[in-house]
Image (tube, rainbow, N blue to C red):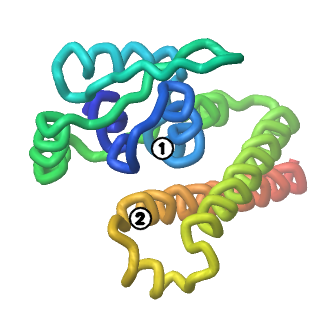
Amino acid sequence: MSLKYAVLASLLEGEASGYELSKVFDVSFANFWPATPQQLYRELERLAQDGLVEARFVQQERRPNKRMFTLTPAGREDLRAFAVEPPRRPTAVRDELLIKLQAMEDPEAAHALVEERMTWARGKLDRYERVRDRLLDGRTEDEYLRESDRVGPYLTLLRGISFEEENLRWCERVLGVLKHRAAWG
């Protein structure tokens, strides 16, 4: 899959500038498809050239003019066709920390790296919970799922939450193993 479909999916929420889209990505998509603002801007240009998004200029008085992007009917159709295709391959974990642990010779350094990962995971969980609160907007989960036009953003958010919860469980297990090894040494 390419960034193309992640950008098209993000525009299902409505018109957005490149800057606004980068903020949406940072909160909503980063847990499963991270992208830099530069990557997003390049992709928006390609999508506009391909007729999958439409751009309009908005003049601003005290700030630079901005471009606002929306899905075109062709973009919606392309995204719809993509969404029903089976994924090409299963998800694979690519994690630098795992390589470092595989090569580990210094348990104290490994301990520090895992603690850092735990801090990162807790921060992401906090951010995801704030996003969840905004999505639910005072409703229960059942009410939201029953009343919302689109549940995809909520479902992907749940995946991000469960991923970080599992990261925390794994980190706790690793720290326990390192502690036991230290006691045996």
* Residue 40, percent from left and from top: 44, 22
Residue that sits furthest to the front in the current view:
61
102 or 117: nearer the eye? Answer: 117
The residue where tag 1 is placed is 29
Instruction: Tell me what residue is drawn at x 39 percent, y 73 percent.
Output: 148
**Residue 5 in the image: above or below residue 151:** above
* Residue 71, percent from left and from top: 26, 37
Q: Amino acid at mark 1?
A: Phe
Q: Amino acid at mark 2?
A: Leu
The residue where tag 2 is placed is 155
* Residue 57, percent from left and from top: 42, 19
Q: Residues within 10 Å of mark 1 (few under 14, many from 20)?
A: many
Q: Residues within 10 Å of mark 2 (few under 14, many from 20)?
A: few
Which sits earlier in the primary sequence, circle 2 or circle 1?
1
Picture quadrant of residue 53? top left
170 or 77: nearer the eye? Answer: 77
**Residue 173 in the image: above or below residue 112:** below
Distance, label 2 to label 1, CA atoms, is: 12 Å
Instruction: Tell me what residue is drawn at x 87 percent, y 37 percent.
Output: 108
Instruction: Tell me what residue is drawn at x 68 percent, y 50 percent.
Output: 124
Q: Is residue 122 left or right of residue 39?
A: right
Secondary element at image label 2: helix
Instruction: Tell me what residue is drawn at x 35 percent, y 19 percent.
Output: 43
Secondary element at image label 1: helix
* Residue 81, percent from left and from top: 10, 45
Residue 84: mark in rendering: none
**Residue 144 in the image: above or below residue 60:** below
Picture quadrant of residue 184? bottom right
The N terminus is located in which quarter?
Answer: top left
60 or 182: nearer the eye? Answer: 60
**Residue 174 in the image: above or below residue 132:** above
